[in-house]
Image: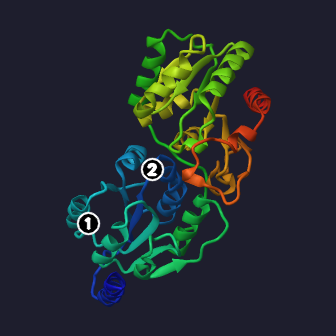
Amino acid sequence: MKNRFIINALSLFNRFRKKRVLYPAEKSFLVVSTTGLGDTLWATPAIRCLRESFPKSYLAVLTSPVGCEVLKKNPHIDELFVVKNSSLSFLKVFFRLRTKKIETALLFHASQRLALPLCAFLFIPDIIGTKGCSKGLDALLTAALEQKEEHEIARRLSLVQRAGATLSSLSLEMAWDKEDEKRAEGFLESHRIPSFLPLVGLHPGAKDRFKRLPPALFVRLGQELKERLGCQIFVTGSLSERSLIETVSSQIEGAIPLTLPISVFSALLSRFALFITNDTGPMHLAVAAKTPTLALFSPTDPKRCGPYHAPRSRVLYRPATCFPCLKKKCQEPFCLLQIPFQTIVNEALELYAR
């Protein structure tokens, strides 16, 4: 009850103050996307639409440490503000942002509950978000759009449309530079990989266990693709997944475990002939790099979270087999196992041949 009173009071105070704030002639935007790798990439089409619609505007993004790695070379962004999951981190960012006189905040996704109150305390006149996506703080929004059955990228695009942007290209965007290209090339040279050899990536990890195809099946997949295509297999993952990727790669002849910074990994991904992955952030990274991508989905609905406007990608999906779905309580990839192994092989070979 006390929290509800504070939220309502802050909401009313924020709306009262907005009449007193003076803004520069050009528009100024703050995109809030304090989340993980894939969710951050979902923001890039909307960010690009904002920049193309308002080329002279000030466009800042409030993001997470991993989001910073994704967006730091994005040409459409003027400034990044990075917050960690602590009140002190938000306080430091507050003092930096208060000088910017932001006109419009767009709540794409906020893993931290403090993100929306931060916008309110900055007295941003227009705070746009989606109903039910604000961790119980919808009262702080000045414009709350209704939730729809749509892809998460489309939801973000609806928010920038509400801010006056016109939609253009809807593809994901990941930027890297010549130094990243050089490091990717150096990685291949250090492993003496011939330039004519097709590169194929396997990504056996995922944040949630129920989204991970068993490592043994990735081993079988890598072995079969190696035999059928004569390709160089890479097994990719984060530092925290090092044990997993070494377990898989050690059982595939000549396979190389691969853990690289996000921008270097993206540059290398763009050279892959095929990338096979669970439902996880690097899947969207591969899509952004225009790499032919086979995504394995279940129980998450790819219509909401899968590849979006990505003609070089395919999805193998099986809906949840249990009702109600246990989601994060599920410790076994029971739904994924409903996808026949040979179907995965056939789809991979067909995608490679395109």
Dot 1: what SS? helix
Alpha carbon distance from label 1 to label 2: 22 Å
Residue 78 at what x, y percent from top left? 35, 56
Q: Which residue is mark 2?
A: 36
Q: Which mark sits nearer the N-terminus, 1 or 2?
A: 2
The amino acid type found where label 2 is placed reads Gly
Find residue 117 and report its image quarter: bottom left
Find residue 63 and report its image quarter: bottom left
In the rendered image, the quadrant that contains the C terminus is top right
Which of these two is toward me, 139 or 25? 139
Residue 80 at what x, y percent from top left? 33, 54
Which of these two is toward me, 300 or 13? 300
Residue 201 at what x, y percent from top left? 59, 27
Q: Which residue is mark 1?
A: 97
Q: Residues within 10 Å of mark 1 (few under 14, many from 20)?
A: some
Is residue 294 shown left or right of residue 66? right
* Residue 259, placed above or below residue 164: above
What colouring does the structure picture have? rainbow
Is residue 123 shown left or right of residue 130? left
Q: Residues within 10 Å of mark 2 (few under 14, many from 20)?
A: many
In the rendered image, the quadrant that contains the N terminus is bottom left
* Residue 354, placed above or below residue 188: below
The amino acid type found where label 1 is placed reads Leu
